[in-house]
Amino acid sequence: MIFALVNQKGGVGKTTSTVNLGGGLHRMGHKVLIMEVDPQSHVAKWFGFRNPQHGTIYDVMDAQLKAGNTGGEAMPLANVLVETSEGLWLAPGSRDLAGLEGDLRNDSINGQFILSEVLAPYASEFDIILIDCGPTLNLLTINALVAADFVAIPVKMSELDMDGVGEVLKTVSKVKAKLNPALEVAGIFPTFTDNTRYGDEVEKAAAEQSAIKEHMMQSFIPDRVVYREAVGVKVSIFGMGRNKAVREAADYYLDLAAELLWRTGRFSKAEIARMVKAARINAPTSNDAAEVAYARS
Ligand SMILES: Nc1ncnc2c1ncn2[C@@H]1O[C@H](COP(=O)(O)OP(=O)(O)O)[C@@H](O)[C@H]1O
Ligand SMILES: [Mg+2]
């Protein structure tokens, strides 16, 4: 199952949600691959793969594009995969993706299908593949939509950007009509909310646009400092110890993961409940060394 996290605005929580959903889904028992098609390569930076020795998703996509045109060698995605300490698989991005976007645009025959071709042999190798997209609906994002089964759209609630979400939905419809009939919207979820779900204003703004309302999720991600702290630690929120703030922050992503899985229609409520139970971070015991270390740092 492939999910693309898309919103053409930056700073709405795409990368944070990709990584933390990955962490949660991994704890739920799924084999997860996180990849990014964003030249900012924030996922690579998050996990400290700033200059990956074995190449990046750029090299794989570039080779695939060239192979399609010259019959040269494609590069297997496996060459660039790295496993994190938490057990997440990553296909890191690189700044070179910006240049590749131009090459994709210049290739009117193959340009939209490169990522889908790259991922095809891996669809059964991983239970879940999460694609973190950049803050634009360019050809890299289109490639992600063509490769994906589902789209998840984070919306920063403080900015009430329902027009932006409308744009994303329009693009998804076009991709579904012309390029990837299997594509579905898994859901739109609010990010950076206060503690009380999302406000009346937002509900009203969303309700005015029925296309948005239809996909609006129950789950949401509140504005919490602890989400920002995970970036330096090279783990998702699920690898950050067991103090109360971490457990609560992780629970929001577990709820979101559970609702996304439910919305795929591929799991029963009972199956999902079992996964969530297994994944929950337990409260620390008094002699929990890891917890003490985290509290001191
Ligand atoms: N729920 C949240 N609460 C607080 N800070 C957050 C939250 N989600 C993301 N952030 C922070 O906001 C910034 C933008 O988030 P990011 O996930 O990189 O957005 P995007 O990928 O959409 O550009 C980052 O510094 C990130 O750590
Ligand atoms: Mg990002």
Image: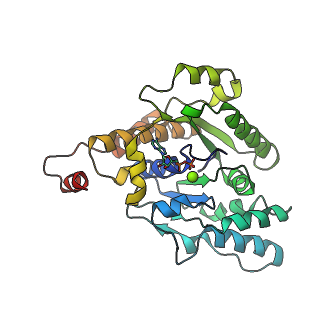
Where on the picture, by quarter, is residue 48?
Answer: bottom left
At horizontal 52% and vertical 54% (from top left) the residue drawn is: 127
Q: In this view, does 27 lie above or below 51?
A: above
Question: Quick one: 210 or 294, which is closer to the camera?
Answer: 294
For residue 25, say whether it is visible.
yes
Where on the picture, by quarter, is residue 213?
Answer: top right
Q: Which residue lies furthest to the left in this view?
A: 287
Q: In this view, does 2 lie above or below 177?
A: below
Question: Quick one: 49 or 9, which is closer to the camera?
Answer: 9
At horizontal 80% and vertical 78% (from top left) the residue drawn is: 71
199 left or right, relative to 225: right
For residue 123, say whether it is visible.
no
Residue 8 pos. (x, y %): 67, 45
Q: Residue furthest right?
A: 108
Query: Quadrant location of the C terminus?
Result: bottom left
Residue 110 pos. (x, y %): 81, 63
Residue 226 pos. (x, y %): 37, 45
Question: Quick one: 85 or 278, which is closer to the camera?
Answer: 85
Residue 218 pos. (x, y %): 51, 29
Question: How many circles with numbers are drawn on the protein?
Answer: 0
At horizontal 64% and vertical 53% (from top left) the residue drawn is: 134
Q: Is residue 178 above or below residue 94?
A: above
At horizontal 50% and vertical 46% (from top left) the residue drawn is: 17
